Image: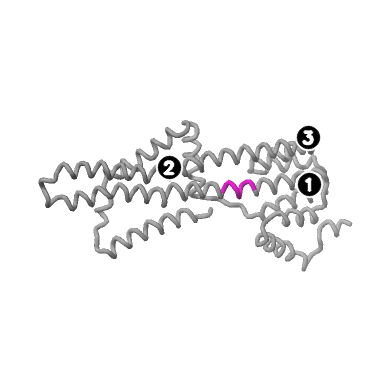
Amino acid sequence: MDPATIIGIVLAFGAVVAMVTMEGAHLSALLLPAPMVLVFGATIAVGIASGTIKDFLTAVKALPRALRGKVEPPQQVIDQVVGLAEKARANGLLAMEQEADSVDDPFLKRALQNIADGTDGDELRVLLEDEIATRSKKDRVAAKFFSAMGGYAPTIGIIGTVVSLTHVLENLAEPGELGPMIASAFVATLWGLLSANFLWLPLGARLRRLSELDVERMTLLMEGVLAVQSGSQPRLLGERLRAMVPDGDAEKGTAKAAKPARGSKDPVEEAA
């Protein structure tokens, strides 16, 4: 779990609470039900109206993922693929069927099952690339939904302020009440801006980033299992996959891979 989004949102709202407290104002002045119902309710409604029900359900299902943000380190993927290469080298490609039964990742499971079934390498590459593209497209739908709500929320907040100010103008005969009423009117604009910049836009950006990381992970798996199918040497395969990840991750991976070499030889070298 990567709690960056939860931590960021809590800190952002905490900064607002701290500012209100330092100004000597009351937090209850901002927690007004009417403008909050308008901003959040209308923003979600307009978001639904801008797409399809399927898009909305996709975004709702993606919300827990955006908050949890489970990110699998590249080195973990590389170690897994190298382990598969060693087993395939020792026991043959049919051993991948047993490995598929013990794998939780649906993408890797299907790839290993196809290898065990003897699927042609070119056909398997096309199949896996299509699956990666479909997954990426689905993630973009959810990210687009939240980003769109981030665009609507400030405008809806202004609408709420205009409606409230209309009510203020109806009560000009009572000057003593104008101050609190005008202050309340601007709460809708505040919540429109807060919800857009503290919730919807960060969630959209978070899903886009998680999608990028997921595509990188699946690409590593795809290249890895295709190399396993072609009989690549495990150690060289690990080096190749490490070359595909960013420099920082590659250096960490190289360091981790080098540690066992001090006390033991490479399994392939021992077999030779």
Residue corresponding to mark 2: 149
Residue 175 x/y as whole percent:
12, 50
Residue corresponding to mark 3: 119
- In front of the other: 36 or 227: 36
Say if the magenta span includes residue 63.
no
- Residue at 38% over, 44% down: 153
> Quarter of the image holding residue 252?
bottom right
- Return the mark for residue 262: none
Q: What span is in magenta? A: 210-215
> Which tag, 3 or 2, sits closer to the chain's start?
3
Residue corresponding to mark 1: 227
Q: Nearer the viewer, mark 3 or mark 2?
A: 2
> Which tag, 1 or 3, sits closer to the chain's start?
3
Instruction: Report, in whole angstroms, how far the alpha carbon at label 3 lies from the one at label 2.
Output: 44 Å
Find the residue positioned furthest to the left.
173
- Residue at 19% over, 45% down: 168
- In front of the other: 125 or 173: 173
Secondary structure category for the residue under label 3? loop
Residue 268 x/y as whole percent:
84, 56
**Amino acid of disc 1:** Ala
- Contact flag, marks 3 and 2 (Cβ < 8 Å): no
Q: Nearer the viewer, mark 1 or mark 2?
A: 2
Residue 217 x/y as whole percent:
65, 49
Q: Is residue 173 above or below residue 268?
A: above
Instruction: Report, in whole angstroms, how far the alpha carbon at label 1 lies from the one at label 3.
Output: 14 Å
